[in-house]
Structure formats: C-alpha cells, structure tokens
Amino acid sequence: MKKLKVGFIGLGLMGLPMAKNILKAGFPLVVYNRTRSKTKELEGLGAKVAQNPSELAKDVDVIITMVTGPKEVEGLIFGKQGIVAGIKSSTNSNRGSTPKVVVDMSTIGPQAAVKIFSQLGKRDVDFLDAPVTGSTPKAITGELTIFIGGKPEVFQKVRPVLASLGDPLFIGKSGQGQAIKMVNNMIVAISMAALAEGMLLADAEKLPRSKVAEVLENVPALSPFQKLKLSNMVNKKHPTLFSVANMAKDLKLARSEINSGSPKLPFLTRVASMYKQAQNKGLASQDISAILEVMKN
Amino acid sequence: MKKLKVGFIGLGLMGLPMAKNILKAGFPLVVYNRTRSKTKELEGLGAKVAQNPSELAKDVDVIITMVTGPKEVEGLIFGKQGIVAGIKSSTNSNRGSTPKVVVDMSTIGPQAAVKIFSQLGKRDVDFLDAPVTGSTPKAITGELTIFIGGKPEVFQKVRPVLASLGDPLFIGKSGQGQAIKMVNNMIVAISMAALAEGMLLADAEKLPRSKVAEVLENVPALSPFQKLKLSNMVNKKHPTLFSVANMAKDLKLARSEINSGSPKLPFLTRVASMYKQAQNKGLASQDISAILEVMKN
C-alpha cells in the first residue's frame, strides 16, 4: 500500500516533535509554520516546506493541524490561502481522487469541532477531531494518547499516521474526541488544585513539603500526573510542560459546554476562574502546577 | 526479645482484620469491643477478651485503638473503666516497668491527637497518632499505609506490631500523622468530586459512561484510587469500601484546622459541604463515590 502523504501545520512545543515522528515513520511530509524558521530542522530531515496552508493542502492526502485554539484552526482551514482553498484547486485539476482528510489535533472544544466537521463535509472533505494528552515529553517519544471523534472509516484510513504519534483511541462521533479531552483536562486541573490545597494545609500544619512529597509519592490517592508536579511544589519552580495559559483556554472551552444548562459543575467553574486569575497575574507561561502560587494568596 | 503484648480496641470493618493480622504475626493479643459478639472469631483464634478497656490496659504493653472519631478515642482513654484507669492500677502494683504505649489508629485530627499526647504524657504514658490509609481490602492483606506522629523512640518500640498491619511511615512530632492523613483524604475527596464532575460533563456530551471509564482507565490523569471508583460511577452502585459518613467526618476535621485562618482552601470547603449534604440525603453508609448522585441534582 502506498504511504499516505502528510501535511503538518503548527510546529510548536508539541507539533515539532510530532512532525518528526511522522517523518521517522516514513511518511512523505510537507510542513507549514507561521514562523518560517521553525521549519528548518524538519527541512534538514527531508520534509518539504510549503509557503502557505493552501499550497500544503494541494500536495498531500492528510492535513494535520496542531495549533492553539478554535480561532486559529478555523483560520487555517477556511481563511485566505487556507486548507480549503488549496483542496478546492487540487480537486479541480485532479477529479476522482479520494477525499482528503483534515485531522485537527489541537484542543478546540466539541462545538468548534462539530462545526468544522459539518462545513468540511459539505465540501467533501473528511474531518477528525484528534486532541492529545501527554505533554511535550510524550510528544517526543511518540507516546501521546489521542482521542478521536468522527467517522470510523476515516479514522481507519489515517490510523497509521496517528499511530506514529502514540495511541489513537476512537471515542465516537465528531466532537467526542474533544469532549473526552475536556473531561480529562478538567480532572487534571481540579486534581492540581486539590494537590495545591493539600500542600497549603500541610504548610499550615508545619509539615515540610519535602516530607509531604515523599509520602504522597507512595499513596494510591495520587495520579501519575499529580506525582509529576510534586517536586515543582516543593521547589516552588514550575518549568513548563503544560502551561497555565493553555489550561485556562481548555477550561474556558469546557465551561462553554455547560454555560447555559445543568449540571452546574462548581469545581470546574472554580478552577477555571483560578487559572484565569493565574494567567492575569503573570503566570501564563509557567506550568499548571504554578496554580499553587495563586492559591496561597 | 520478648514479644510485646498487644491490646486492640475497636473491631469494626477495619479493626477486625487488623487484629487478626497482629495475632497472625505471633503477638499475644487481648481484645475489647463494645458489641461483644464481634470478639468471638478472634477468641476462637486464640485472643483473650477483656470486659472493658481498663481490664485490657492492665494486661498489655501496647494498646491500639481503632474507632470512629476523637470523642470515641477520648472516651476509651480517659473515661470510666478506660485505658488510663487500667494503666494506673497496673502501674501501682508493678513499679519499674517501662511505660505503656497507646497507639490510636483512628482518624481524629491533629488537635485531638496533640491533646491526648500531652495529657497521657503527664501520666507517663506514651502516645502515637497512627492513622491509616487503604480501606478494608488493605486492612485484610496487611498492606495499610500508616502515618506516624509522636516520639521516634516510641515508634521504634512498637514498630514490629505496626509492621504486621502494613507500611508504617514516621512523619514527625505528635499530630503530624493525623495532619498528613488529612492532606491525603482531602486530596481523595476533591479528586472524587473531580471525577464525578467529569462524568457529568461526559453525560452532557452524550459520551457513554462505560466508554469514558474505558478511556480514563488508561490515562495518567487518574489515580489508582479514582480508577477503583470508575465502575461504581458506570453502574450507579456504590458498595462501601470507604463510607460517605467517614469522609464527611474526616473533612470536618480538616476544615477545623483552617477554620479561623488563612489559607482559605475553597475546594476543601466545598467538598466538605458536599459530603455533609450527601450524608444528610441518606447516602451516609454508601461508598464515597456516591457523591456523584448528589452532584447531579
């Protein structure tokens, strides 16, 4: 079987190592990034560099986007010199080819994903929402967990590409990959707040944080994710694996799902406002464990 | 070295299997329980049964209490026919013997532990706070985690007895075993609420809970403790390993540590009132995962 030709847009902290893994797995790769300098390393490894998303889309079977939020993704797909424009021109000159697939791996929320799925559907372009969990270290090792929403047969088609990035899990119809990502991230955020409050209670009890960390490292109450942040809380340093700004954005998306209706989800509401506060207090680029520094005030 | 003679008071869901493990490890054992019938099985295994805490205390080197909360522990130690009364009479008839040790393994909070430590100290009786984590299954297998507060040399003396129950960790001075137990339990409680809210968001997104559980089983966002409760949330059945009533009590103790001062700990405050609410709504004897059934209203 012929290897799918892949286009990759968004070479940030996550995107760059992901694009490398696709190349390493042997897929012909075309990349685009707004800041051109970030494409250099991949060019050296054999990737082609496109001038804009439109040019990239013409040339490939699968287009992956890995950017910040819903506005950025919609801009890349539907904007001037965007993906749709490129697909349209290539289809005109190349009738009868199978539909191209756009796979968005950013965290954009279910509402945006369903909207894009439906708008691309009208243009005979397939779409999957495929947000990931695992932060940069797992992006580098190709061990991300990938939550897929969309048509199962479209997932099967691009599965080998996604498998080069980690473990792709088919969740359900369009938007449901995003939905479970939100569930995952709100649990991460609230658990981080729980750990931070635990440390503050320990402070009040005059328990040294290093002792607390040593004990909590070995109890079933903590998740691997929480354990990863214990040393940040002991050292009061928060080197970024997952930024406050990104978490604030994800929690805002989660809240927008339940804004008008029941259930109320008071913990989500509270933690969302805490991360927003942390962002406003200059902690935007620090790791999510930096929430502790806001909570103690 | 002569084996320590152990007295064990409180043969409930936790206490009964713990007492069995002490006996199994070869320590001569005397037991007392308010409801006499619960002593039968241990009597059959070779334990002596005392008529009251006072009689039990006379006869042993170490007295372990495993009951509900601070009032019960204080009653057992200082009440009529209590532990202190028994120690006093045995000391009078047996001068020169080493001080007896009272080890309370209930969750009573740091304030009560420090108070008992100080009052027993005046009477030349040693005291350790030694609350446990791990629920009934770990009590049965002798794999509890035990958080010790008190004098290190007293801990060393009774360590072999505690080692028959699980992994004893020396935390620090009197009350600090209780302090870290509170930190642990507030993290457990808030994490349970986080998981419950995640399930409610998933419901709103029309994600089947069984699918959510299957995915969350494999992500680093969840703790072993949370994973243990996923099936309860899918099946909407909450068989008790750790009851709502006990968690409500533990959270009340934690809150009483920070009632007047800063930090404010809003998540602890919220989750404490939720568990109280769950208790008042008839869920007291169900597992802590039943919090989900209150939150959805």
Image (tube, coloured by chain):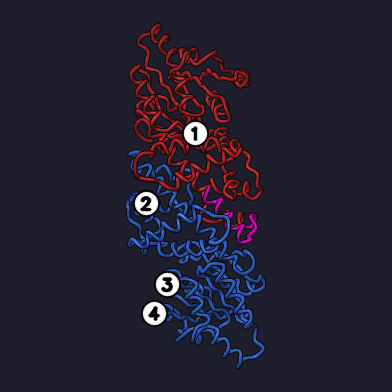
Chain colours: A blue, B red
Q: Is residue B64 magenta?
A: no
Q: Residue at x 50, y 35 (%)?
A: B249
Which quarter of the picture shows residue A113?
A: bottom right
Q: Which of marks 4 and 2 is nearer the N terminus?
A: 4
Foreground disc of the pair 1, 2: 2
Distance of mark 2 from mark 3, alpha carbons?
29 Å
**Which badge, 3 or 4, is on the more N-terminal residue?**
3
Q: Are marks 3 and 4 on the same chain?
A: yes
Residue in the foreground of this view, choosing between A59 and A123:
A123
For the residues labelled 4 and 2, the Cα–Cα distance comes to 36 Å
Task: Report whether A129 appears left or right of A269.
Answer: right
Q: Distance between the residues labelled 3 and 4?
A: 10 Å
Residue plotted at (60% across, 59% down): B204
Q: What is the distance, in whole Å, between disc 1 and disc 4 at their CAs? A: 57 Å
Residue most toward the front? A260
Local SS, label 1: strand
Q: What residue type is labelled 4?
A: Thr
Q: Is residue A8 above or below residue B111?
A: below
Q: Residues within 10 Å of mark 4 (few under 14, many from 20)?
A: few
Q: Is residue A87 above or below residue B190?
A: below
Q: Name the residue under label 2.
A: A295
Q: Mark 3 lies on which chain?
A: A
Quadrant assignment, res B210: bottom right
Q: Give the range drawn in magenta.
A: B193-211
Q: How far apart are marks 1 and 2 (CA)?
A: 35 Å
Residue A35's label in the rendered image is 4
Instruction: Bin the neighbour count of mark 2 within 10 Å (Cα to Cα): few under 14, some 14-19, many 20 and up.
Output: some
Residue type beneath disc 1: Gly
Residue hosting label 1:
B166
Q: Mark 3 points at which residue?
A: A12
